[in-house]
Amino acid sequence: MANVFDVLNERGYIDQVTHEEELRELLEKESVAFYIGFDATADSLTLGHFLQMMVMMHMQRAGHKPIALLGGGTTMIGDPSGKSDMRKVLTREMIDHNAECFKEQFKRFLDFNDDRAIMVNNADWLMDLNFVNFMREIGVHFSVNRMLTFDCYKNRLEQGLTFFEFGYMLMQSYDFLYLYRHHNCKMQLGGSDQWSNIIGGYELVRKLEQDKVYGMTFKLLTTAAGTKMGKTEKGTIWLDREKTSPYELFQYLRNVDDRDVEKFLALLTFIPMDEVRRLSALKDAEINMAKEVLAYEVTQMVHGKEDADKALEASRSLFAGSADSESIPSTDMDAEIFEEGIGILDLMRELGLIKTNSEGRRLVEQGGITIGGEKVEAVDRMVSLDDFKDGRILIRKGKKVYHQVKI
């Protein structure tokens, strides 16, 4: 079996790593316990987190042991990395609820049987720390001068940085030390924005324990256009089906930029790299087949084969001009609303297809809205019961966004 370091490198995950050759050799010869931390700032993981799940799955398949660290304690502060202002402070109850939601999602991707992976919550060791003892044991090893050179702090100095947030690096570094001492954890992984936090922990463990441990970051999931993948006009792409339906996840991936196909197939699926290169080399209309493969593989891993099959069927029926699939996003509305008619702009706002009337006017004027396959020509177009066929109508926004209304 190929060394997992080489697999991660070939597929484009690795950004920075400490002691590269040493780490590669370690991953070759022994099973390594490693961790990734997930602060519980929401009640679902996102598509961005899915990249981290993929890294953990690659590592576990190669015989290494994932530690999924729930940040029940660190979320009480909030990581300042990549933030221009202070994160919203969540209550303990909200954080605990979010952590429980994460637990259920981790189980879809990692095998926790027979101790092959473990899940821990840093609230268990951070919440009852004695401040003076903590600062005497841990704080003494951190130089304020050096910490202020790290981007996560340096970028915040003009807007203001609280001591509350300044302590985050010490807490995350202590996590690594705790996991080393209690679970023989030798490696911390995270997104590239976590490099300074990872270095803090790596140096702390090496200094206090006189042992070799390692850090690795992987590239953040961005599109060819330079935007963070998983962000849309409607908001974040979530792994919770109630927040982002399997169909919406499928369609998001089905509609990625042609330039992103190879990158996302490599990072978000287990398809062998030879096949990734073959699929991404397809041209013109054929590249859509590669996008379909990408969308299907990810949807299947996140939601299961049945939902992936339904999403594939729905997507194909739309591209074929049919709207029979039950998987297309839909809203049930009272027939009385349409007896006298409702304006197209009001209807689209109600459905969440537009945020403002001015956005809707622009779309209509540019020919970007259709109802039942017919282009909407006027912004004052009324939608009535006459527009429904078999109790439903299909509204299309642009080329790729579809929504059914049922009465």
Image (cartoon, rainbow, N blue to C red):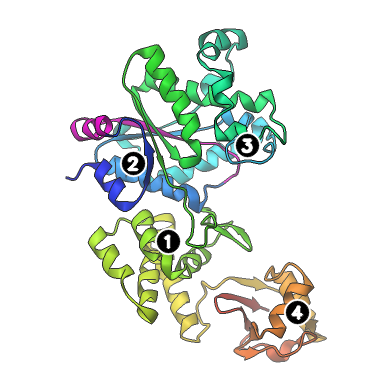
Tell whether position 210 is magenta: no
Disc 3 to disc 4: CB gap under 8 Å: no
CA gap between label 3 and label 2 equals 39 Å
Return the mark for residue 155.
3
Tell me which label, 1 or 3, sits earlier in the chain: 3
Q: Seen in the image, is 72 located left or right of residue 345?
A: left
Q: Which of marks 3 and 4 is in front?
A: 3
Q: In which quarter of the image is residue 316?
A: bottom left
Residue 160 placed where, x, y %? 72, 32
User: Which residue in the structure is indicated by mark 1?
Assistant: 299
Q: Can residue 334 be seen in this view?
A: no
Q: Can residue 41 be seen in this view?
A: yes
Which residue type carries mark 3?
Answer: Asn
Tell me which label, 4 or 1, sits earlier in the chain: 1
Helix, strand or loop at label 3? It is: loop
User: Which residue in the structure is indicated by mark 2?
Assistant: 111
Which residue type carries mark 1?
Answer: Thr
User: Which residue in the structure is indicated by mark 4?
Assistant: 361
Q: Which of marks 2 and 1 is in front?
A: 1
Residue 330 placed where, x, y %? 61, 72
Start-end of magenta stretch: 21-43
Tell me which label, 3 or 4, sits earlier in the chain: 3
Q: At 41% from the left edge and 24% from the top edge, which residue is drawn?
A: 202
Farthest residue toward the right?
A: 340
Tell me which label, 2 or 1, sits earlier in the chain: 2
Q: Quadrant of residue 97?
A: top right
Which residue type carries mark 2?
Answer: Asp
Residue 323 placed where, x, y %? 53, 82
